[in-house]
Image: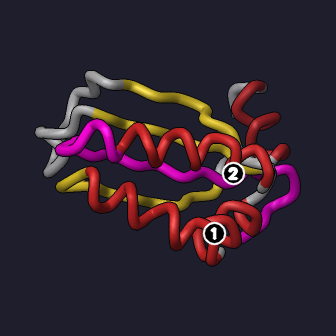
Amino acid sequence: MNKKGAKGYWISTAKIINQDLFDKYVNKVGPWLKEVGGQVFAKDTEPQGKERTEGADLAVICEFPSMKDAVEAYESEEYRELSKLRKEATENSTFTIMEGLDEAAKLRRAMGM
């Protein structure tokens, strides 16, 4: 964990069942993400769900400066409270935290190695 130059990512899919409540979550989580160094990297409201995510109508990837930052943000008291809104507004949600490629791996890939 925490390879040099590797970013951390939240990857989530869900089916929104209460749009008003989900909008409330988005309005609160957006500014909070910036405070903790995160940002929405990708978002799709028509993802092609596969392998138990077929009903999802939302897929989001959030990027953090490091894996440590991604984990600490998720485990924070602030996000614990915010996630209650997300969980209540969605069903069949998935949530994964993963580490990206480090700088050496990116260089090797660029060089075709």
Is disc 2 placed on a helix, strand or loop? helix
Where residue 86 appears, x then y in whole percent? Answer: 38, 55
Residue range corresponding to the magenta coloring = 1-21
State the residue at coordinates (38%, 25%). Answer: 44
Q: Which residue is mark 2?
A: 32
The answer to if 6 sits in the magenta stretch is yes
Q: Which amino acid, mark 2?
A: Trp
Above or below, comparing residue 10 to residue 42 in the picture:
below
- Locate residue 107, reporting x and y percent: 81, 34
> What amino acid is at disc 1?
Glu
Left or right, 34 with respect to 98, comes to: right
| Pointers 2 and 1 in contact (C-beta within 8 Å) | yes
Whole-angstrom CA distance, mark 2 to mark 1, is 8 Å
Q: Is residue 80 visible?
A: yes
For label 1, the residue is: 78
Residue at (60, 51) in percent of width and height: 9
